[in-house]
Image (tube, grey):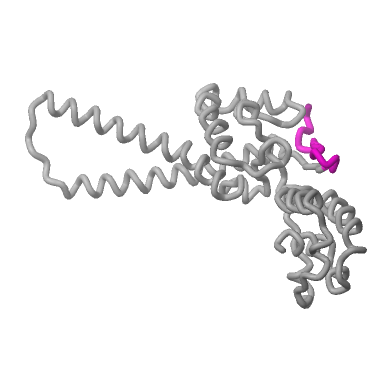
Amino acid sequence: MSRAVDRSISVRTPESIRFSYDLAGLGSRFLAVALDLAIQLAVIGAIFWALALLAAHVPHAKSAAAGGRLAGSIGVAIVVGIVFLVFFGYFIVLETFWDGQTPGKKALGIRVVRDGGYPLDFGSSLIRNLVRVGEAAAGFYAISAIATLLSAENKRLGDFAAGTIVVRDARVERAADLSPAVPHSTAGFSMLDEDERALIARFCARRDAMAPQYRARMAAQLANLLRPRLSRDLQVLDDDDLLGRLNAS
């Protein structure tokens, strides 16, 4: 239990291809949340500072006691709404539109994906972060920490509810960025059947979340299967770049 950071998970696709991911440990997830919390506090502070400046320049009219109570209630509602939106909308929006990452997760090199390695969608992000409300209220993520340590997949309660996992980001440089460009050719593309194209697309959708060694191994397996039927200028491409070129065709 003490080394959740070293855990990994393997998933098998319908085409019997196995993908492996290194799971993010409790320590990296806690540090990512701490960094995101610091950013959120700074954002809230800036918003309230701006509101205070605005209020200072708005003339105040005398009102009845009932009107004063109503204004106070509205003010409290606005404050609660701002805090809720910043603390939980922050995660939902960023994870959905920033490929499963927040600034804290990006700094720690981790990201959220759906079970099976699929990219995170809005529904999954919404569920896992609504559950975060209860987790944060229950001893400031104490229950989450316990669940993560006990789970074989390092899942907190929100991950169980949404069907998500947090993995280490395994981005690698593409060969096209390191070597001269190879003239683009479509010769040989027609030799691929629909199942092979679907398999290439599945690999390209998941490769950014794979551990480097597994990504390289899977790319080599797929590329070696396809190369004999491709034109010579495509055959000389790096495995990963070849699959990317085929997926974009």
Residue 17 at x, y percent in the picture: 84, 43
Q: Is residue 110 left or right of residue 229?
A: left
Q: Quadrant of the N terminus?
A: top right
Q: Above or below — where is 2 with respect to 8?
A: above
Q: Is residue 108 left or right of residue 213?
A: left
Front-most of residues 61 and 78: 78
Q: Quadrant of residue 15?
A: top right
Q: Quadrant of the C terminus?
A: bottom right
- Residue 78 sits inside the magenta stretch: no
Residue at the (66%, 48%) spot, across then down: 108
Q: Is residue 138 left or right of residue 243?
A: left
Residue at the (50%, 44%) spot, across then down: 93
Q: Quadrant of residue 51?
A: top left
Magenta stretch in the rendered image: 1-18
- Residue 9 sits inside the magenta stretch: yes
Is any atom of residue 210 visible in this view?
yes
Is any atom of residue 170 visible in this view?
no
Residue 115 at x, y percent in the picture: 70, 35
Residue at the (15%, 47%) spot, across then down: 58
